[in-house]
Image: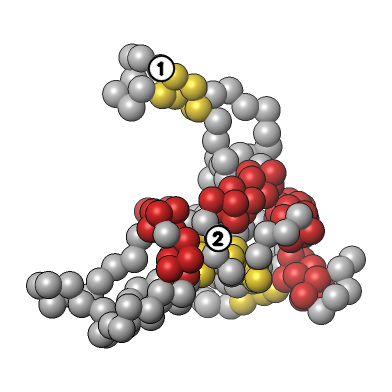
Amino acid sequence: MGLLDGELSDRGRDDGGQPRRFHLGQLRENPRQGIWRHDGRFRLRLLIGINYYSEHAVEFDRDSPERFRFAPSWQATTDMGWEVVPEGLYRMIMAIAKRWPVKKLYVTENGATYPDTVESSGRVRDVERIAYLRSHIAACRRAVAEGAPLKGYYVWSLMDNFEWSFGYTKRFGLVHVDPRTGKRLPKDSYWFYRDLVAGNEP
């Protein structure tokens, strides 16, 4: 989860001259001033961005340094080994909406990596990614229907990217990228998402 547009303006400085920072905990303490606060020195504008990929159940483990371990799971996983749990996105959106009275929530990252294969025709049939996106967008729709102030959804990512220590071996994109040539091929998920945002969901 990230805070967007949540820093104070240039006039909001602490005693040491540093920009003041706003913490989500302040919303619980003073929710009315937390969203639109005027004290003569700054104005705060707030929205919350959610980066969600997976949800993992844990259980207590006294022998672990962290005092927990991941619980056994039956869910399908992505190529990262992350469980596919769209209900987790719904739960996160609703929990934030209930806990902090913000006016705008956005899903700023959501997506999945799978071992895409380019056919001789140039087509990439990434049906698992389409299923992932469809189920998570449905979770967003459910949250909106139940009153969550969700205003936007962003897929991660448009194109295959350099994925940290995994390099180019993990592909999140709607567009396939050949790292050797830079050639780009829209995957089936690209066309699915195009139709979805146009209001013509297949």
Give residue 111's quadrant in the image: bottom right
The x, y position of residue 148, in whole percent, is 68, 59
Q: Is residue 156 visible?
A: no
What amino acid is labelled 1 in the image?
Answer: Asp
SS class, disc 1? loop
The answer to whether 201 appears left or right of 120 in the picture is right
Residue 51, label in figure: none
The relative height of residue 202 versus residue 8 in the rendered view (above or below) is above
Where is residue 113 shown, x and y percent of the image? 59, 54
Which label lies toward us, 1 or 2? 2
Q: Nearer the viewer, residue 35 or 95?
A: 35
Quadrant (top left, top right, bottom left, bottom right) of the C terminus = bottom right
**Number of numbered labels in the structure image:** 2
* Residue 101 badge: 2
Name the residue at 53% across, 77% down.
182
Report which quarter residue 195 is drawn in. bottom right
Q: Does dot 2 land on a helix, a strand or a loop?
A: loop
Q: Earlier in the sequence, mark 1 or mark 2?
A: 1
Left or right relative to 34: residue 150? right
- Viewer-side residue, 47 vs 51: 47
Please state which of residues 53 and 180 is positioned toward the viewer in this rendering: 53
Q: CA separation, marks 1 and 2?
A: 35 Å
Q: Is residue 37 visible?
A: yes
Instruction: Give the residue pinned by disc 1.
Output: 61
Q: Name the residue furthest left.
A: 16
Q: Going 53% across and 45% down the picture, which residue do you hit?
A: 80
Whether tag 1 and tag 2 are in contact, CB under 8 A, the answer is: no
Q: Residue sitting at 64 percent across and 51 percent down?
A: 94
